[in-house]
Amino acid sequence: MAYLSFKNINKIYPNGFHAVHNFNLDIEQGEFIVFVGPSGCGKSTTLRMIAGLENISSGDFYINGQRANEMGPREREVAMVFQSYALYPQMSVYDNIAFGLSLQGVDDDIIEKKVTETARILGLTDYLERKPRALSGGQRQRVAIGRAIIRKVGIFLMDEPLSNLDAKQRVTMRSEIADIHRKVGATTIYVTHDQTEAMTMADRIVVMKDGYVQQVGSPYELYFKPVNMFVAGFIGEPPMNFMSSDVNKGTVLAGKTSLDLSHILDEKTLASYEGKKMVVGFRPEAIELGAKENAYVLNATVELTELLGDNTNVYVDIDGVKTILKVDPHDTPKMDSQIQFSIPYNQVYLFDGETEVVIENKTRNL
Ligand code: ATP
């Protein structure tokens, strides 16, 4: 196992493109860290700098307290699993898993012991004689993981390892990878653009955008205490709804309905926003149908409903503003009907219209 530390890491590619800005992070021994963000945010670049496949332009990177900027990939004792499994098609599952150890000249009986143990952890015992083409996508991915974990390295890196799998396999492999992590215990850094993977697997998530870290926190913190609109909109599915307006006499508007901000903000904060732009946000799942107490009550027209089984997504129009609500399927409203719904005050998020930074809601106590 290993612990890692990044101090003001920057990556500037030879063409001058600044892909990672002032990346700071400490990763504890055995942690499962997920880097998440949209395409191009710099997550793979950061992972490749950890692996030693990409040089670090400035800043200091430490593995187990030792400066590692100039260490070669082998010295770092990392294993990496890529999106493409890169298995050898002519070799059996056994030989694919054993390959790295064979190259190192490890004794055959030790290799056999290790491959048997690795196959047991991964549920591949019955497939050791097969060639990769006779395996499902999920099984191939497990072989790729087996090849990495057999080396018993301290740091395990994964770059979008599930993106070639279908939706059902992804769900299964998510829990399998989490289970392997529990058994093997290696410090793991996992890159994905899929917020569900991040939320379900991570001890801590690092949200990135345009080369900058936006927030680092547990899945709970990112969901309930996003620091800005980007994180609030990225984490959660369907995403948070946003409505923007100017603060006028202590109120904001969603469509034509005003919200008295004194319910949510302390006096001083409220006064400082008079006349400025503010964004109201609420999660689709945080609403209640009907008019409730201690809540922002809104009227809307139902445009579309999507029954998903455990809930229904209701697409509504609030005086021209399009939003999504998530309701119990038994309460699904009719298309084109007028509905009323409530956002409890402690579920309302407010953001500075200029900086997009969250403004503290005095009724939230999480
Ligand atoms: P994706 O999910 O699409 O892989 P990512 O978040 O992993 O995205 P990176 O691959 O880290 O993003 O790339 C970050 C930025 O750096 C992108 O804008 C990309 O175009 C740029 N980039 C990547 N490699 C190079 C390179 N060799 N030279 C110049 N720019 C590069």
Image: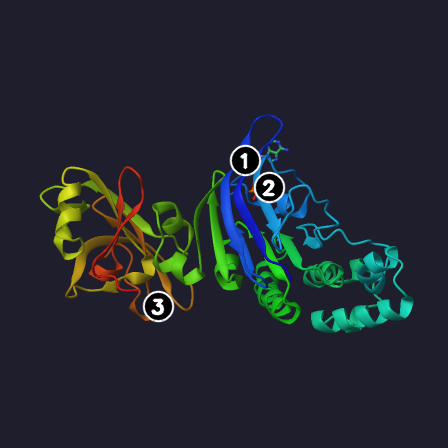
Question: Can you tell me whether the CB of the residue at mark 2 lies under 8 Å from the nearest atom of ligand 1?
Answer: yes
Q: Earlier in the sequence, mark 1 or mark 3?
A: 1
Asked if one can make out residue 22 in the rendered structure from this viewpoint, the answer is: yes
Of tags 2 and 3, the one toward the viewer is: 2
Secondary structure of the residue carrying numbered label 2:
helix
Image-quadrant location for residue 180 = bottom right
Question: Can you tell me whether the CB of the residue at mark 1 lies under 8 Å from the nearest atom of ligand 1?
Answer: yes
Report whether 201 appears left or right of 350. right
Report whether 185 appears left or right of 262. right
Q: Residue at x 68, y 51 (%)?
A: 82
- Residue located beneath label 3 in the image: 329
Q: Residues within 10 Å of mark 2 (few under 14, many from 20)?
A: many
Which quarter shows the C terminus?
Answer: bottom left
Q: Where's residue 305, x and y in %? A: 35, 58
In the image, 10 versus 95, the foreground residue is 10
Using the image, tell me which numbered label, if any, was put on residue 4.
none
Which quarter shows the N terminus?
Answer: bottom right
Marks 1/3: CA–CA distance: 44 Å
Using the image, tell me which numbered label, if any, was put on residue 19.
1
Using the image, tell me which numbered label, if any, was put on residue 45.
2
